[in-house]
Amino acid sequence: MQRVRKAIIPAAGLGTRFLPATKAMPKEMLPIVDKPTIQYIVEEAIESGIEDIIIVTGKGKRAIEDHFDNAYELEQTLLNKEKFDLLYKVQEPTKMVDIHYIRQKEPKGLGHAVWCARNFIGNEPFAVLLGDDIVKAETPCLKQLINENNRTHSSVIGVKRVPDNETNRYGIIDPIDQNGRSYQVRNFVEKPELGTAPSNLAIIGRYIFTPEIFMFLDKQEVGAGGEIQLTDAIQKLNQIQRVFAYEFEGKRYDVGEKLGFIETTIEFALEKEELRDDLLKFMAGKLDLN
Ligand code: G1P
């Protein structure tokens, strides 16, 4: 089986949870401390061995393209001022990897966004990374799934346990059999109503697919929330080829909603030497007040 070389990053969503910040700015450009969330995702893809990335964008997403492009004037100014450390930071996202773009012309859902990139992928296995989750792990999360794909030669879906009262926010798996971190799956269910979830193993935005997924995305009808759901196509793929779920190792940060975004920002800031002590003092002051 061919190696996984290409990745799709869907970034066409409206970002309604962060309005009005996302009225004129893509939610993928919201920074965790000083780096846009989408850069963390691109870095994970590269560290996992991905060579070509396609970002599926939509209206109002130009800033993403600009971020991964050269910024001549800014670079020249920094060079003239001999601010080499900043120059490095500005150039880093440009040098990382070849990034391609395609627009999803209508907001028809995640399954449709992935389908939009079908010609770029062609007939080989590929990865999908969603921007709402950042994962910190010894082996990058996507690399763990690629390793599992090398072992099983099958599609592999990243999962993590979530609390029972959050299962309605995710795609949930109905596992049959477990082998270490790997599960065989009976059903993949998109956003089951609370109390009806078959498990609390939730799909967390990292996928490896065989190209056959496009057969189902081609004719996928709308599902939960009136959108074309990727999970529904996975469920159909699982009827003709085994699709494994893999409970990846590492800590997952949900940057797709406000509280998770703030928690992630604080945790990542505490890891920065230049911020840590002052931030701890500030937080201790807040606690004293209560
Ligand atoms: C999407 C998927 C869902 C998955 C989730 C992970 O939902 O449809 O299966 O669990 O991402 O973040 P969304 O968050 O786009 O509604």
Image (cartoon, rainbow, N blue to C red):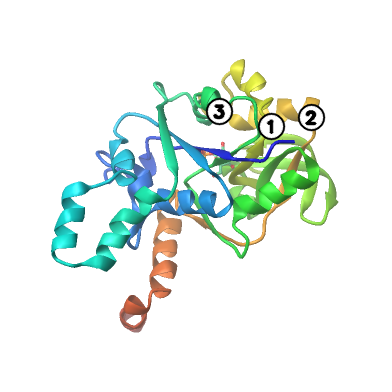
Residue at the spot of label 3: 111
- Classify residue 54 as left or right of residue 175: left
Q: In the rendered structure, which disc, 2 or 3, sits on the residue that comes first in sequence?
A: 3
Secondary structure beneath label 1: loop
**To which residue does mark 2 refer?**
241
The amino acid marked with disc number 3 is Gly
Q: In which quarter of the image is ligand 1?
A: top right
Q: Position of residue 275 (x, y in %)?
A: 33, 76
Task: Name the element at disc 3.
Answer: helix
In this image, 51 relative to 65: left or right? right
Give, as a three-letter code, the residue at label 2: Gln
Q: Quick check: 33 above or below 121?
A: below
Quadrant for residue 266, please give it. Answer: bottom left
Q: Nearer the viewer, residue 131 or 212?
A: 212
Characterize the local packing of mark 1: few (<14), some (14-19) or many (20 or more) Cα atoms within 10 angstroms.
many
Cα distance between the residues tagged 1 and 3? 15 Å
Of badges 2 and 3, nearer the viewer stands 2
Q: How far apart are marks 2 and 1 (CA)?
A: 9 Å
Q: Say whether disc 2 or disc 1 marks the residue closer to the N-terminus.
A: 1
**Hey, which quadrant is residue 205 in on the image?**
top right
Q: Find out whether the residues at labels 2 and 1 contact each other: C-beta distance under 8 Å.
A: yes
Q: Where is residue 241 in the image (x, y as percent from the top left)?
A: 79, 29
> Circle 2 — which element?
loop
Q: Residue drawn 61% across and 65% down?
A: 138
> Within 10 angstroms of label 3, few (less than 14), some, or many (20 or more) residues?
many
Q: Name the residue under label 1.
A: 210
Q: Do the residues labelled 2 and 3 touch (CB within 8 Å)?
A: no
- Quadrant where the C terminus is found in the figure: bottom left
Q: Residues within 10 Å of mark 2 (few under 14, many from 20)?
A: some
Q: In the rendered image, is residue 233 in sight?
A: yes
Nearest the viewer among 181 and 100 is 100
